[in-house]
Amino acid sequence: MNNKDISNIFEGIHQGAPLDEILHLAQIIAPGFDTELLKEVHRDLTAFFTGTHPDFQSNTMPYHNLRHSILVVLASVRLFHGLHCNQVHISAATLFKGLLAAYFHDSGMLLREGDSAKSGTEYIVGHELRSIAHLSRYAEKKNFDSKIIKNCATIINYTNLESDPAIFNYHTHEIQIAGQVVGSADILAQMADRYYLEYLPLLFIEQQAGGISKHHSALNLMEHTSNFYHNIVLKRLITTFSNTSIALKAHFKDRHTIDRNLYIDNIDKNILYLRKIIKKCNSMEDIQQYLKRTPPPI
């Protein structure tokens, strides 16, 4: 396969659209899975982010946007499928909870109608709790079982980079797996994105506006990205999440006859290229010459 073929697979548009691939894999993992319900969730979250739902304003976040959320769902279902290929049982109920949590995991940065905040950046700190609140409200309107809300709250908390799942309230092994899957997918979908390097300056803008930036400039953030990956991200993927992400290799081998983990491959390429251009450049103006891709608007 050429780079375009692999890129289309990675983006979930090899056959149809990301949702088509998500639904296809869900049915393989758990025959009888309610695909119509997941389609409804997908439509609703799209409406939330685009501001076409009466309860929400259009998303104002340049980095944590609708595309990111969908790519996290896609990475999650691929991880679940890889585990399925490795003979790990994933029930339809657990699969739905995992994917529902993935859809909602960053919804806490959305502004509701009548919200006093001027930007979703005001909710970056603690957005996981607000995401859980949005999911809870949604689940109650849909008359979902109360266990779904409780379990999805736990799964969303796995996406908090500063959280320690070892001290979470008791949850079953299946929910632990779902949390590790979605927590891993959130990291992988971001850092393996073919537009990741172009998105980094936007991430800096978000963090600075939200008061959580540990860097004095976008260039400084980019200079520290390689260390962030090797010293923090890999430890979380391998240790905190029990190296669940390795299951992606089984997914790509079974689904596309590619005996590689495309997510880790893409991250390695991104980090290698970033390190090369950092050595050559002294300013963001210099770096922009090497970042030619235009990220999609959503």
Image: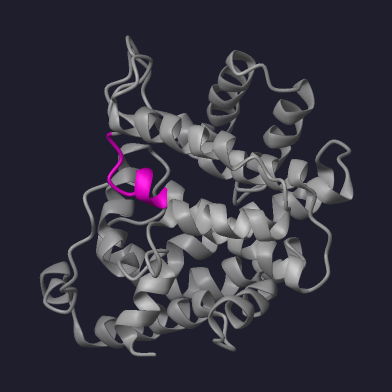
* Relative horizontal placement of residue 119, taking residue 253 as reference (left or right): left
Q: Above or below — where is 222 with respect to 125? A: below
- Segment colored magenta: 60-68
Q: Position of residue 119 (x, y in %)?
A: 29, 28
Q: Is residue 236 visible to the viewer in this orientation of the structure?
A: no
Q: Above or below — where is 95 with respect to 47? A: below
Nearer the observer, 90 or 72: 90
Q: Position of residue 63 (x, y in %)?
A: 33, 49
Residue at 40%, 66% (x, y): give it: 15
What residue occupies the far front of the structure in this picture?
A: 32
Nearer the observer, 6 or 232: 6
Residue at 59%, 64% (x, y): give it: 78
Q: Is residue 250 visible to the viewer in this orientation of the structure?
A: yes
* Relative horizontal placement of residue 151, taking residue 143 as reference (left or right): right
Q: Position of residue 255 (x, y in %)?
A: 58, 75
Residue at 68%, 70% (x, y): give it: 82
Q: Main secondary structure of the magenta part?
A: loop
In this rendering, the count of numbered labels is 0
Q: Position of residue 127 (x, y in %)?
A: 51, 33
Q: Above or below — where is 14 with respect to 157? A: below
* Relative horizontal placement of residue 291, taking residue 183 as reference (left or right): left
Residue at 31%, 53% (x, y): give it: 204
Q: Is residue 273 magenta?
A: no
* Relative horizontal placement of residue 241, taking residue 131 as reference (left or right): right
Q: Quadrant of residue 180?
A: bottom right
